[in-house]
Amino acid sequence: MDISVGDHVLDLCCAPGAKLCMISDLLGDSGSVTGVDVARHRLAACRTMLQKYVLGDACRLFVADGTTFSLMPVRDHLDSISCEFALEEKKDTFREWTSRRPWKERKRAARARENAASRLVSETDHPELIFYGKSSGVVGLSKDELYQTVSSSEVSSSGYDKVLVDAECTHDGSIRHIQKFEHWGWETLNGRVLNAERSDNLTTLQLKLLINGFRLLRVGGSLVYSTCSLTVSQNENVVEWFLKENSSAALQAIEAAKDWPCKSGRIPKTLRFDPVTSKTSGLFVAKFTKLAV
């Protein structure tokens, strides 16, 4: 992704959080990272990981549908003095995040978890902010300011510098994942990996995630699309259709790949890793840039 200090990065399918932590570490003391995932309990794992490794200072986490998420990064951070004035003058503002909540609020949250421990958000749900660091740009903002939307023309300059779409897939390229089916049973493998209807649904989801991630990218920024599937339908076919429908998208060569144990995908500038070539699990990677049109 070529993360640089000061970048504003969007991780559109961020759970369980390892890549999110790596991005946060690369950003250093400036920039921000926004993590989005549809499953609240998985996003909570991201929050735990960020706190464990003290990497959440410039991070914010939203429970949201990655195909419809539309919030821009906060590019103008308030300094500590300005933030104090903002908190004094505004009543409905975000103060520094804390995990300590009133007893009644904790009880309501526990009851909600019991009723729907793994609830997935719908496309119409408002993004739920479950964590933000003190340097993420959230502190001092009102809810209206945080959730304001921008026009398509404004995205070209105020969008994210880098976007990662590590899309949900069948995981058929993941050796560790496939090994689990020895315990789960091969009927489960057929239902989760080999089922044609599920594969078609995943391909549709992957394309929607890619389209929305690219929409939130600023002109000149870059987006990385990846899966741990070996199938052409979830990789090259998605890339091919996306390029056909988006004239402002262009594939970028990944310069660092010349030293990687991988091979070219079926589309030039895309990469594939596999157990034979790379001595790793399967992985597909494509990098796009947004052109001014």
Image (cartoon, grey):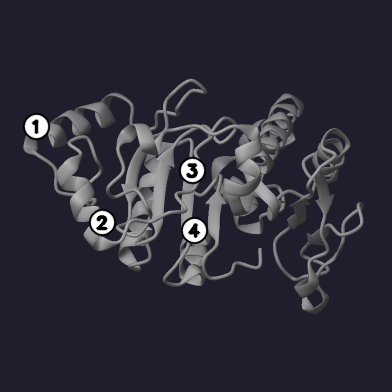
Circle nearer the viewer, 2 or 4: 2
Badge count: 4
Left or right: residue 4 compared with residue 277: left
**Rendered location of residue 119, percent (x, y):** 40, 28
Q: Which of the marked residues, 1 or 3, is nearer the chain's N terminus?
A: 3
Q: How many angstroms separate mark 2 from mark 4 (CA)? A: 29 Å
Residue at numbered disc 3: 36
Q: Amino acid at mark 2?
A: Ser
Q: Amino acid at mark 1?
A: Lys
Circle nearer the viewer, 1 or 2: 2
Residue at numbered disc 2: 82
Residue at numbered disc 4: 20
State the residue at coordinates (78%, 70%).
278
Residue at numbered disc 1: 104
Q: Are marks 3 and 2 in contact (CB under 8 Å)?
A: no
Q: Which of the marked residues, 2 or 4, is nearer the chain's N terminus?
A: 4
State the residue at coordinates (81%, 42%).
293
